[in-house]
Amino acid sequence: MQTERNIYDITIIGGGPTGLFAAYYASLREAKVKLIESLKELGGQPAHLFPEKLIHDIPGHPQISGAQLTQNLILQSKSHKPTFVVGEEAQTVEEAYEQDGSKYYILRTDKHTHFTRTIIIATGNGAFSPRQLTLSEASQYENHTLHYFVPELQKFNNKTVAICGGGDSAIDWALMLESIAKRVYLIHRRPNFRAHESSIRAVKNSSIEILTPYVPSAIEGDGKKVSRLVINKNRTEEFKELDVDEIIVSYGFTSSFGEMRHWDLNMARGAFEVDHKFFETNRPGIFAIGDSCYYEGKIKLIASGFGEAPQAVNGALLHINPDANIAPIHSTKL
Ligand SMILES: Cc1cc2nc3c(=O)[nH]c(=O)nc-3n(C[C@H](O)[C@H](O)[C@H](O)COP(=O)(O)OP(=O)(O)OC[C@H]3O[C@@H](n4cnc5c(N)ncnc54)[C@H](O)[C@@H]3O)c2cc1C
């Protein structure tokens, strides 16, 4: 196992939007920064789960796609040259002491050992995978005409698409595809959707055909190409047959913090519990931001993660040097 000997000031775990912005801000503050990402590509959820979706609530961007936001964040984060390590999953952490008594952390990934004075966890909800459709025939259509990720919108050009799900992403996909697809069905098992009010209003005012409360009960086709989706009205014997070309299942994602669950960090609501000041966990010098953290009033939005990043960086700088200036001048320069 290769060992890297020099001790970094701040190691950020997770290269999603929050981690990337933290890496930028920490290196702007002249800290020695490393970012470790388990996937081979940086960018987190916007890059991998919704590259083409337009995001409307990023300050300063009336609208921006997940892919464009990722590109901008990577460009910005690299401007002060932090160290990026991709394709390594953070697994264990232990405390160590230098000869002068100052504490640092030994952070092990599945490939290497890293040394750092502080850690900022920005792992989102951990490694993610989609909740699947529980129909036995579903898996054969997967990656052909049944999708859990939407790679490119144009694939659905002039197609009849059934979107299953009732949360923000199902509604977002339906709205994005309305002008591209021939016809869009939105199928949800409950009468009401769990999404932003404005999105629900937009769907209701659109040509999208809403089918609630229905659940998929069978897929018909040649094993690759879907031709029909049969849906069942919840708790009744009523069925509908929809002629469709493509099915998008948007039931959310399951995710796991893996080995990081054993770091002796307090957890709340499936996230690392942090304080309100610097987003520090119960282990001094270990912070958590973005979707990976929980505090009272936490909202899982990209904008919230962007706000938490500078606070955590300031906390980390103070942890390293209690005399550090945590109220830097508010004008930035290259
Ligand atoms: C379909 C969809 C639409 C959305 N739309 C919006 C929207 O319009 N506006 C908005 O504000 N938010 C939206 N969100 C939520 C938004 O994507 C998240 O709030 C945001 O991505 C959180 O950023 P993050 O950096 O905290 O985590 P993530 O984006 O989840 O990034 C975490 C990164 O950490 C990595 N990682 C995980 N475990 C490890 C490990 N052990 N070691 C190393 N790396 C690790 C992951 O691979 C990942 O790259 C949407 C989410 C989805 C799914």
Image (cartoon, rainbow, N blue to C red):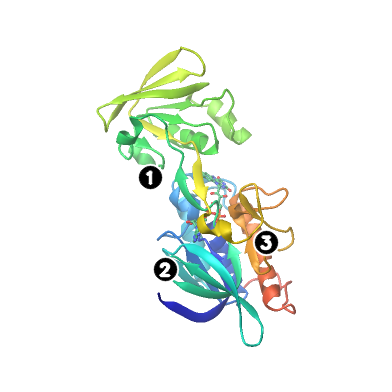
Label 2 sits on what residue type? Answer: Lys
- Asked if disc 3 is less than 8 Å from ligand 1, the answer is no
Asked whether the residues under the numbered discs 1 and 2 touch, taking CB atoms below 8 Å apart as contact, a structural biologist would say no
Q: Which residue is mark 1?
A: 151
Separation (CA) of disc 2 from disc 3:
25 Å
Instruction: Name the image quarter holding residue 1.
Output: bottom left
Front one among 283 and 15? 283
Type of residue at label 1?
Pro
Q: Is mark 2 within 8 Å of ligand 1?
A: no
Residue pictured at 50% horizontal, 44% vertical: 254
Q: Position of residue 275 (x, y in %)?
A: 72, 59
Which of disc 2 and disc 1 is earlier in sequence? Answer: 2
How far separated are the C-alphas under marks 3 and 1?
36 Å
Q: Of the residues under marks 3 and 1, which one precedes in the sequence?
A: 1
- Tag 3 secondary structure: loop
Nearest the viewer among 36 and 149 is 36
Earlier along the polypeptide chain: callout 2 or callout 3? 2
Say what amino acid the circle numbered 3 marks: Thr
> Mark number for residue 111?
2
Across and down, in percent, residue 84 comes to 47, 69
* Residue 327 vertical position relative to residue 264 in the rendered view, above or below: below
- Labelled pair 3, 1 in contact (Cβ < 8 Å): no
> Horizontal and vertical percent for residue 208?
47, 26
Q: Which mark is residue 281?
A: 3
Tell me the quarter of the image containing the C terminus. bottom right
Task: Decide: few, some or many residues near mark 2? Use Cα within 10 Å; few <14, some 14-19, many ≥20.
Answer: some
Q: Secondary structure at mark 2?
A: loop
Task: Tell me the CA gap for discs 1 and 2.
Answer: 29 Å
